[in-house]
Image: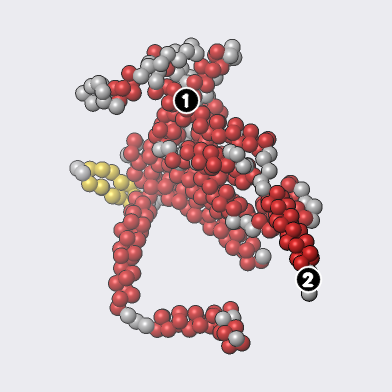
């Protein structure tokens, strides 16, 4: 037969064990892994990102050897039909 | 209780299933034949007939005259012509290099990505989505994207090198550069598939296995070497077979990026079949070449699967 005090002690220790278990089960952040994964994600997206950048450049800037990026929304505007597209007409 | 256990034992279940199978075999329902008919027709029309035509064509001298084929027997002349050509062996060599490189590199990267994503916390939701994006891009768009990076004139890579004061490279113009470029493009495009396979297999491993290993004092490398790698071997083998088949079939990206050049340096088997069949209209040699490729792939995969099944049986 357990006394009331013993029961309280058991309840307390089980709660403490639960807290400890939660603490140990919480996933640890490993910064190196997170950074490497960020780098891998950026490298994976780079070709897609580059294509998006080129979509907003004039033809002259695309074929130029200079590293300049003048914003040119006309291509996309043409493509999405606010003006008569050279492809469609 | 005892009765239930006896009837639920594996031996009893096996006997029951064998009995059902025998009973099924004994039933001669006409419905069974009708149910099989669509598959038989599809197999006949889509697999057996084209294959038979290719075999027939490879032993014939075929010419296109007034909208139809003109057949005359050629014996093994087509095979002699194909196997005697230096281009054929160069194409086989290119394909072997391409397959070995893409399979090995994509498995290494895919496995690395799966392990990283499995251990990540903050980057997990983002990386799990972003890393499979290349696989959903159409091959034509992939070729265009990489052409805008690798092109010697308008390519972003040469632009970057030039602005850093480094000499520009003819990525798609030199033989080795073109081969490395198409390998990079294929690895970028299809590593996400490998990653998906291996990540799913990794997630299927029981976590208690890792906990037990950690309690026994195993470090991360030992866990990888002794638990993860052996348990992932079937998935790696499956993905290697799939990537090999994809390598044999690879066509669109290479064709759009290099057109098989320079000087046949990136011509793979699919493109050579296309050149022989549709560009040169050499139907006999084209069929002989296709048949040789099919035989090589079938024999290689047969050996791999046989060795694997033997190993599994031994295990």
Q: Which mark is residue A50?
A: 1
Query: Could one spot residue B93 in this view of the protein?
Result: no
Position of the N terminus of chain B by quadrant: bottom right
- Given the current orientation, which residue lies at the most extreme left position? B66
Q: Please determine whether, in this image, residue B295 is positioned above or below residue B107.
A: below
Quadrant containing the C terminus of chain B in the rendered view: bottom right
Q: Is residue B147 left or right of residue B67?
A: right
Mark number for residue B13? Answer: none
Secondary structure of the residue carrying tag 2 is: loop
Most foreground residue, B211 or A21:
A21
Determine which residue is flagged by label 2: A2
In the orientation shown, which residue stands out farthest toward the bottom? B3
Q: Looking at the image, which is closer to me, A45 or B191?
A: A45
Q: Is residue B28 visible?
A: yes
| Residue at horizontal 41 percent and vertical 80 percent from the top | B25
Identify the chain of the residue marked 2, using the numbered disc in the image.
Answer: A
The mark closer to the camera, 1 or 2, is: 2
Q: Is residue A17 above or below residue B221?
A: below
């Amino acid at each position: 037969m357990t006394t009331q005090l013993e029961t309280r002690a058991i309840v307390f220790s089980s709660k403490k064990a639960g807290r400890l278990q939660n603490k140990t089960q919480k996933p640890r952040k490993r910064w190196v892994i997170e950074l490497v994964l960020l780098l891998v994600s950026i490298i994976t997206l780079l070709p897609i990102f580059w294509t998006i950048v080129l979509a907003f450049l004039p033809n002259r800037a695309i074929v130029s050897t200079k590293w300049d990026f003048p914003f040119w929304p006309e291509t996309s505007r043409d493509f999405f039909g606010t003006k008569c597209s050279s492809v469609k007409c | 209780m005892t009765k239930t256990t006896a009837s639920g034992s594996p031996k009893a279940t096996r006997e029951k299933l064998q009995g059902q199978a025998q009973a099924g075999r004994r039933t001669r329902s006409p419905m069974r034949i009708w149910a099989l008919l669509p598959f038989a027709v599809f197999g006949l029309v889509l697999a057996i007939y084209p294959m038979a035509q290719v075999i027939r064509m490879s032993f014939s001298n075929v010419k296109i005259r007034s909208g139809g084929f003109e057949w005359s027997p050629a014996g093994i002349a087509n095979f002699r012509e194909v196997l005697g050509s230096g281009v054929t062996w160069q194409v086989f060599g290119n394909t072997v290099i391409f397959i070995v490189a893409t399979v090995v590199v994509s498995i290494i990267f895919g496995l690395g990505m799966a392990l990283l994503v499995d251990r990540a916390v903050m980057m997990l939701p983002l990386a799990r989505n972003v890393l499979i994006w290349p696989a959903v891009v159409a091959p034509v768009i992939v070729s265009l994207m990489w052409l805008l990076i690798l092109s010697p004139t308008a390519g972003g890579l040469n632009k970057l090198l030039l602005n850093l004061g480094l000499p520009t490279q003819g990525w798609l113009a030199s033989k080795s550069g073109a081969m490395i470029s198409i390998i990079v493009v294929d690895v970028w495009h299809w590593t996400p598939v490998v990653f998906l396979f291996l990540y799913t297999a990794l997630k299927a491993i029981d976590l208690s296995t890792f906990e037990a290993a950690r309690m026994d004092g195993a470090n991360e490398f030992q866990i990888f070497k002794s638990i993860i790698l052996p348990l992932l071997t079937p998935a790696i083998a499956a993905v290697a077979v799939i990537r090999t088949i994809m390598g044999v079939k690879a066509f669109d990206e290479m064709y759009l990026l290099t057109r098989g050049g320079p000087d046949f340096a990136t011509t793979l088997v699919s493109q050579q079949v296309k050149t022989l069949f549709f560009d040169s209209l050499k139907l006999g040699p084209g069929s002989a070449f296709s048949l040789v490729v099919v035989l090589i792939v079938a024999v290689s995969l047969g050996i791999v699967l046989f060795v694997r099944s033997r190993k599994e049986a031994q295990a």
